[in-house]
Image (cartoon, helix red, strand yellow):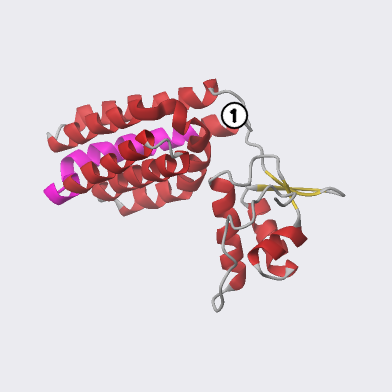
């Protein structure tokens, strides 16, 4: 186990060619959003570089970019640490997410084709299976995929672009409560599918609003596992 907290083999060494700085950035961001690297964790350049099979330079550049985007804190004379989100930061983001996704649900009810509904059911089944298997990372990934597809069915490119800007951070906040939300979250997804299938825009909005509020409340009530 590295002092960064990364077990050996957690992430494969990066392969070349390709823009290395982007690949290192993507790899580190994935480790952060999945909480393999946990909030408050010290990020040691040399160990991350060794783990990823690269030099320190692209790691340093990635950490600087992650700092600019709010994922990493750079502390003088101490180094880099995964950012620890405050309750206010989480609340602000989850409120914005609720606004975007409530409108997406309404538009999906108006615009979703039959094959889109079929895909939503498939994604819901994948999430339910992940819950049954108690695979937290898989649950979080399935949840993100389900919500992203609702956004796709909405058919509004600007709305989708705005949602994409907060998607990773939403997943970051969702992962520690994925087990707490459990199957109830997927029951709510089923209700949303029913509303979309019925072309009931008002009901779809309501279901999504309640659903996102449950997630926000669960986050604030969670046990501190960081």
Where residue 202 sits: x, y (%)?
A: 21, 28
Q: Residue at x 59, y 46 (%)?
A: 36
Residue located beneath label 1 in the image: 88
Q: Is residue 19 magenta?
A: no
Q: In the shown orientation, is residue 222 left or right of residue 4?
A: left
Relative vertical location of residue 217 with respect to residue 114 in this rendering, above or below: above
Q: In the shown orientation, is residue 200 left or right of residue 128?
A: left
Instruction: Answer with the quarter of the image where residue 213 lies.
Output: top left
Q: Residue at x 54, y 46 (%)?
A: 33
Relative to the observer, which residue lies in front, 109 or 8?
8
Outermost residue, top side:
221
Relative vertical location of residue 128 with respect to residue 222 in this rendering, above or below: below
Where residue 215 sits: x, y (%)?
A: 43, 28
Relative vertical location of residue 93 with respect to residue 3 in this rendering, above or below: above
Which SS does the magenta portion mostly show?
helix
Q: Quadrant of the C terminus?
A: top right
Instruction: Answer with the quarter of the image where residue 47 lies.
Output: bottom right
Mark 1 nearby-residue class (10 Å; few <14, some 14–19, many ≥20): few
Q: Residue at x 23, y 29 (%)?
A: 191
Secondary structure, mark 1, is: helix
Magenta part of the protein: which range?
93-117
Where residue 14 sits: x, y (%)?
A: 58, 69
Where residue 159 sits: x, y (%)?
A: 35, 47
Relative to the observer, which residue lies in front, 27 or 166?
27
């Amino acid at each position: 186990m590295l002092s960064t907290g990364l077990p050996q083999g957690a992430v494969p060494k990066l392969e070349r060619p390709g823009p290395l700085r982007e690949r290192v950035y993507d790899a580190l961001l994935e480790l952060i959003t999945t909480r393999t690297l946990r909030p408050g964790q010290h990020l040691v350049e040399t160990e991350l570089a060794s783990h990823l099979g690269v030099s320190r330079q692209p790691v340093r550049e990635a950490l600087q970019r992650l700092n600019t985007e709010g994922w990493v804190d750079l502390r003088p004379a101490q180094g880099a640490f995964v950012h620890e989100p405050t309750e206010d930061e989480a609340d602000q983001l989850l409120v914005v997410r609720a606004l975007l996704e409530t409108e997406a649900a309404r538009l999906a009810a108006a615009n979703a084709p039959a094959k889109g509904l079929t895909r939503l059911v498939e994604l819901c089944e994948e999430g339910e299976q992940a819950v049954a298997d108690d695979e937290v990372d898989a649950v979080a990934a399935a949840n993100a995929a389900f919500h992203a597809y609702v956004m796709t069915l909405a058919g509004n490119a600007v709305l989708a672009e705005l949602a994409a800007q907060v998607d990773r951070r939403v997943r970051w906040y969702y992962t520690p409560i994925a087990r707490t939300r459990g199957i109830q979250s997927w029951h709510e997804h089923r209700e949303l599918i029913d509303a979309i299938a019925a072309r009931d825009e008002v009901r779809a909005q309501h279901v999504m609003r309640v659903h996102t509020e449950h997630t926000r409340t669960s986050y604030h009530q969670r046990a501190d596992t960081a």
